[in-house]
Structures are given as C-alpha cells and as structure tokens.
C-alpha cells in the first residue's frame, strides 16, 4: 500500500472517530438522566445493606421512594432512629418515633424437649420438609425444624440453630425480616426490642397432643389469660398469644404458666 493510501485511510479513520465522539457526547447530554439531589443524599445516609427489609429493592429503591414521598423517612429497619433522623433532616420533615424491633422464634423444642419420629438424613433445608414424611422428623409438626434455612438468609449473622432450635441474637438483629419471610412454619416474627415476655410456642394442637410431642409446648390451659391484669394475653388456636402493645411486663403470665411456655426475654 502506498503512503498516500495509508494517509487517506488514517484521515478516514480519524474523521469517523471524531464524528462518533461528537455523536456520543451530544447523545450523552441529550439523554442524560437527571438525578435527584435529595435522592442521592438519602441513599448516602442509608446503611447500604440492600437487605430488602424495607420492602423495596435495596437501598437505592428505598431512597428513590423516600425522595418522591412514597416511603416514610424511618422506613429503614436496619438504620433505625439515627438513620431516620438524618433522612428526616435531608427531607425537611419530622423523623417521628422509631421503635426498635427484633426477630423472635416462638419455639423451645430443643433436642431434649421435642420428640422425634425417626432419624432424618438428607438436605438440611426447612423448606424441603413438606416433601418429607410427616413434615420432618420432629414429633411436633408446629415447631422449629432446626435445619437453619433462616440462618442462611440472615445478612447480619444474627440467628443460629442451637440444640435444634433457631435462636436470635437480639443485639445483632436488625429486623430486616428475611428470616420471618423464609420460615416455612411461620414461627419467626418481629417484636419490639423492649418486649419483656413472649409466648414461646405456636402449637396448633390440643394440650394432650402437644404434651406427647414436646415437654415445653403450650397446652392452651388459659391460666396466663386469667393472670394477666392488662388483658394482653389470649389463647388462639390452642396456644398463648401476647399483645405486646398491651403487655406491661409484669410477668404474671409467665409465673402462672405450668409448662413455662411464656418466657422472659
């Protein structure tokens, strides 16, 4: 190829490069997505865990919703009150009261208390137990299966299986709700961090059946209901339920419970 041909090719390539560069520059300006300064500030204030506990697709989704006024400034369960105050300041509104919550597992069916129907060997996943005979090896068909599916989804290492039952570390828990969502037996719920007592069994069986399956199960006798001075305890579906908004933490229900199925936190 001659020198003239090489020079011509270089000119063509250079011209095309300049044209493409100019085109991309203009397109970038023309189609630039404008960012909301408040949204960026809110996103910077969020903890960045992207746990989804707020109900949105990560922190960016929540930041966008807060900036648009579609979500409350205290919607982040992980950040708690400190983060909600920062976001409230950014949005120019009042933060409001933020109650700290924590996950709680309503079961005491440890290996020495809950009976077993057979020895199970297989996948260690609570969700798969619906395909296993009897719904799992434990005699109680309402209690914690103990295979740690909740442990696998916790982004804060706040829940572990101890002696066959999932136990929450209240200090480490950020109340993101992932364990609540994944538990196939719906034994995990979010309760106020300040709660003093909680019902530790959700057996839906009558007393005699529950006693055969687990020595720590609630038999639905109703003594706790009679003992509570604030009407915070009821028996629903054969087990005690505590209304934490009414509970004063007096402990009368726990004291009267013959099976110790109401525990101090």
Image: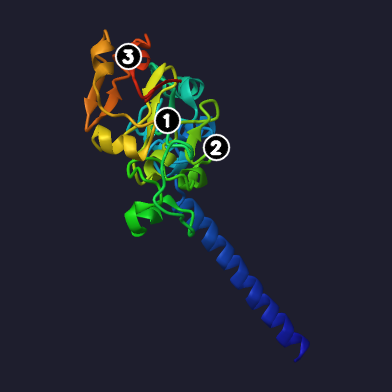
User: With 236 as the anchor, is 133 left or right in this view?
Assistant: right
**Among all residues in the image, which is located at the extreme bottom?**
1
- Rounded to the nearest angstrom, the CA distance separating label 2 from label 1 is 15 Å
For residue 104, say whether it is visible.
yes
- Rounded to the nearest angstrom, the CA distance separating label 3 from label 2 is 29 Å
Picture layout, residue 79 above or below residue 96: below
Q: Quadrant of residue 261?
A: top left
Tag 3 or tag 1, which sits nearer the N-term?
1
Whole-percent x, y for residue 217 in the image: 35, 32
Which residue is depicted at the point 67% across and 76% down? Answer: 11
Whole-percent x, y for residue 227 in the image: 27, 11
The answer to whether the residues at label 3 and label 2 have Cβ atoms under 8 Å apart is: no
**Tag 3 residue:** 247
- Rounded to the nearest angstrom, the CA distance separating label 1 from label 3 is 16 Å
Q: Which mark is residue 156?
A: 2
User: With 206 as the anchor, is 48 left or right in this view?
Assistant: right
Tag 1 or tag 2, which sits nearer the N-term?
1
Q: Which mark is residue 104?
A: 1
Picture layout, residue 192 above or below residue 147: above
**Mark 3 element type:** loop
**Mark 1 element type:** strand
Tag 2 or tag 3, which sits nearer the N-term?
2
User: With 211 as the anchor, is 58 left or right in this view?
Assistant: right
The answer to whether the residues at label 1 and label 3 have Cβ atoms under 8 Å apart is: no
**Mark 2 element type:** loop
Classify 10 Å Cα crowding around label 1: few (below 14), some (14-19), many (20 and above).
many
Classify 10 Å Cα crowding around label 2: few (below 14), some (14-19), many (20 and above).
some
């Amino acid at each position: 190829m001659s020198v003239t041909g090489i020079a011509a090719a270089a000119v063509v390539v250079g011209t095309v490069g300049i044209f493409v560069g100019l085109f991309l520059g203009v397109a970038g300006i023309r189609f630039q997505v404008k960012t909301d300064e408040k949204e960026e500030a809110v996103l910077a204030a969020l903890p960045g865990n992207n746990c989804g506990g707020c109900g949105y697709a990560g922190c960016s989704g929540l930041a966008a919703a807060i900036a648009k006024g579609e979500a409350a400034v205290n919607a982040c369960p992980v950040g708690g009150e400190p983060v909600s105050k920062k976001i409230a300041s950014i949005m120019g509104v009042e933060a409001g009261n933020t109650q700290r919550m924590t996950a709680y597992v309503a079961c005491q069916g440890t290996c020495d208390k809950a009976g077993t129907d057979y020895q199970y060997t297989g996948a260690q996943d609570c969700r798969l137990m619906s395909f296993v005979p009897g719904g799992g090896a434990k005699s109680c068909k309402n209690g914690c299966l103990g295979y740690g599916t909740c442990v696998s989804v916790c982004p804060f290492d706040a829940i572990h299986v101890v002696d066959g039952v999932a136990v929450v570390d209240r200090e480490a828990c950020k109340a993101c709700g992932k364990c609540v969502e994944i538990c196939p037996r719906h034994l995990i719920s979010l309760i106020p961090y300040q709660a003093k007592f909680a019902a530790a069994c959700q057996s839906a069986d009558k007393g005699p059946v529950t006693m055969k399956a687990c020595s720590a199960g609630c038999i639905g006798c109703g003594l706790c209901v009679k003992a509570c001075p604030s009407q915070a305890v009821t028996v629903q579906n054969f087990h005690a339920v505590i209304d934490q908004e009414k509970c004063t933490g007096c402990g009368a229900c726990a004291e009267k419970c013959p099976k110790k199925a109401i525990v101090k936190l």
